[in-house]
Each structure stands twice: as C-alpha cells, then as structure tokens.
Image: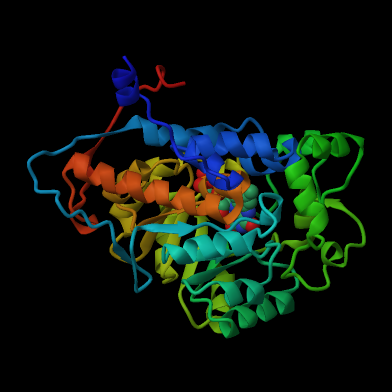
Amino acid sequence: MLESLRSVLQLRPIQLNPAERRLRKAANIDDLRTIARRRLPRGAFDYIDGGAEDELSLRRNILAFRRAEFRPRVLRDVADVDPSTTLLGRRLPLPLVLAPTGFTRVASPGGELDAARAAARMKLPFTLSTMATRSIEEVAAVCDGPQWFQVYVWRDRGLVKELLSRAASAGYEAIVVTVDTAVLGRRQRDVRRGFTLPPQVGLGTLLDGLLHPGWTWDLVRSEPITFANVAGSAVRRGSRAVTLAEYINAQFDQALSWRDLDWFRANWDGPIVLKGIQTVADAVLAADAAVEAIALSNHGGRQLDGAPAILELVRPVADAVADRVEIICDGGIRRGSDILKAVALGARACMTGRAFLYGLGAAGQRGAEHALALLDAELRRTMALTGQRCMSELTPDLIAWRDTLTELC
Ligand SMILES: Cc1cc2nc3c(=O)[nH]c(=O)nc-3n(C[C@H](O)[C@H](O)[C@H](O)COP(=O)(O)O)c2cc1C
C-alpha cells in the first residue's frame, strides 16, 4: 500500500518566493486578473479593469474573439512553428506590442519600468504613454528592447514638441498618436470610487489600503506617483489631486484634425502609428495620409461605449488598406489564440494592455513576463493545433464566425 501511495503522491518543491508562488497557480491571463484583483485595492484594480459607461465595448472586444472559431487543418508538419513577423521594418519574435497605459504605477511600484523590462526580455516593443508614471529617459535607461512613444496631443504644442524630441534623443523608434480621446470616456467605476491622480487617501481608500497591505507598503516606500513626462502640469507639481476626466478635458486638444498629421511629420522623423481608428473610412484616410501603421482600437472599451468590437473590424479594414498601411489589432487579447485570429483576418500584429497590467498587478515585472510567456506559448500551441507554420501563411479562411454568442454571454 505504501508503494502505491508513493507512486501517486508527488509533492511539489516548496516555493519560497511569494511572487513565484502566486504565478505557479496562474495558468492563463484570467488567473492573473484574479490574483491582481485580490492584491490591488479596489480603486486601483477598477481603474485598470474597467471601461466606459455600460462597458459594452469592453465586453464585446473580448466576445468577438470567442465568436471567431478556427477551421483547423491537419497533417501539415508543424514540428517547427514560427510566430515571428515584421512590423515597422523590425523583426519581432511574435506579432505583439505592449500598448501604452497611463498611470501604470498603480499596478506595481516599478510601473512602466517593470513592463518595459518584461517586454525587452521577449524582444517585443514597449509603448510608453504620455500619461506614464515613469519618464521617457527612465524607461530608456532600463529597456534594451524596441521602444515606442505614445502621444496625446496637448493644446500646448510646445510641450508635445519637447516630448517628441526627448523621445527621439532617447532612441524611441516610433510614435503612436492616440486619436480616440477628444474628451475622456466616462469610466463609471472611477467615478463611483472617486479615483484621482495622484491617489488621495480618504476614509474609504484608507480602509481599502489596509485590506491590501502589500500594495500599500510598496506605495508608501516608493517616491510619489506623478505624470513623469509632463513637466509643469498641475498633477506633476502635485498641487492638488484631480480626476482623470478633469485633467484630460483641460489639457487635450479637442480641435485635433487630419490636418495636424503634417505637424507630426514635420516634428518626428520615424514611423507614425495612428491609434484609435474604428472605421474603414478612417482607415482609408489614414492610408491616404501615408502613416506607417494604424492601430484599430477603441481604447480597450474605455472611451466611446458602443464602439465596434475591434476584431470584427480587422478583415474589412485589411481588405481596404492592408497593401498601404500595417494594421495592428488592439483590444480584447486575452489568449495567444486571439493573436492568431487577428493575424489570420489581416492584422500584422496585436497590441495588448490589460493582459500585461494584470500580470504587473499579480507579481510586478515577473507577473508581466509571465503574461507575455503565456500568450507566446498559447500562440505557438494554437499554431500547431490549427496546422499553421508561420504568420505569412495565414489566411482569413482559418476563421469562421459563429452567428450567436448566446451560449457565451
Ligand atoms: C489602465 C489603462 C490605461 C490606459 N492608458 C492609455 C494611455 O495612456 N494612452 C493610450 O493611448 N491608451 C491607453 N489605454 C488603452 C490601451 O493602450 C489599449 O488600447 C487597451 O488597453 C487595449 O485593450 P485591452 O486592455 O483589452 O488589451 C489604457 C488602457 C488601460 C487598461
């Protein structure tokens, strides 16, 4: 009996590192989300996890990937699958870019530094947000992978020009101009929780902080969270806490139009990615404007609620402009198989935001690395199971759309 007990009993070695212990149980991005939800105060988690208004676009971004079903092929020698691709003239090991996310230090003390290091380990581009909590130069100093800089267009063009020139000097390869943020979408979870920048400690947040001592201890020990790139702004000076909506609506240029792209050409020598395209008509205008790439994006469902689910846009946009501009699918990536679906439908690559943020929230840099490794492994496995050897062989007939999502909703 002892013999048979020994044959079935297998004790895992004890893991002393608490972050590694947490990650051992994270089999997918959703598990990382669950761990992040447990570790972060509700206000911080909801800032990351939430979307605008009824969160319809947030949910539909994800559901669109479930509606897309594979038509797998067999007996195709998948001994060596190769998910690498070329994006903006650079070879990438897989078609994935880390999306710009503002205020990332609410997820982990290192914030953008943790995410940039995780991206660099995988040789994937990391996009630093204008609203980042680590500066252009700080990120460049720790990141030896490709870096992109995301631009929000401030009313003060002098400030934007200064940001572009700092990004160029620090070796950033491309800029991502976000065009879906004329005003800030109403993120109701932030409204309800009174989320401000920098975070203000009221009675509710104090209690929340006490219930999440690990996060609070990290916050207290590290330097104050500010918008590290935007010199001279009210928030940078720490003069008073503001809601994100107040801040953005005061600073961003709502008069931005297609004509302004000439200004970017005159002030930036490298490739330009337009992020926030949501119709074929605008994709055509972007191609006419000769930008190098477009990111089909509804800001992860954080801006216009009722915006189209991003995956559903990929094929019509690719049919219209794939020969003139590279297409990035941004929004709803939670599995490596999602990347395969987007590329099969005509995207050159995908961007991901929450997937790596959940990783950061679960276990800092190691958590973000874990998130990227999960997506990589899932992509490779799905390529093998669908009989696809490389990205350039993918065609839209790999995908069929299910009519209804009733059973998934
Ligand atoms: C917490 C958070 C902050 C974000 N901040 C920015 C930002 O500063 N600039 C920007 O262009 N997009 C921002 N986004 C949108 C992301 O770049 C990306 O479009 C979105 O996360 C993609 O959807 P996904 O989270 O489902 O991957 C943010 C998204 C999240 C979740």
Outermost residue toward the top in this view: 1
Query: Residue at image x 73%, y 76%?
Result: 159
Q: Would you identify the image quadrant in which residue 201 lies?
A: top right
Question: 141 above or below 112?
Answer: below
Please provide percent x and percent y for residue 123: 41, 66
Q: Is residue 290 visible?
A: yes
Q: Would you identify the image quadrant in which residue 1 lies?
A: top left
Please provide percent x and percent y for residue 405: 40, 22
Q: Is residue 320 left or right of residue 170?
A: left
Please provide percent x and percent y for residue 248: 75, 56
Query: Residue at image x 28%, y 52%?
Result: 319
Query: Residue at image x 83%, y 53%?
Result: 220
Q: Is residue 215 left or right of residue 315?
A: right
Query: Residue at image x 49%, y 74%?
Result: 144
Q: Is residue 125 visible?
A: no
Please provide percent x and percent y for residue 369: 49, 54
Q: Is residue 374 left or right of residue 42?
A: left
Closer to the camera, 376 or 217? 217
> Total number of numbered labels?
0
Closer to the camera, 248 or 140? 140
Which color scheme does this rendered protein use?
rainbow
Question: 103 above or below 152?
Answer: above
Outermost residue toward the front in this view: 2
Q: Would you identify the image quadrant in which residue 21 lies?
A: top right
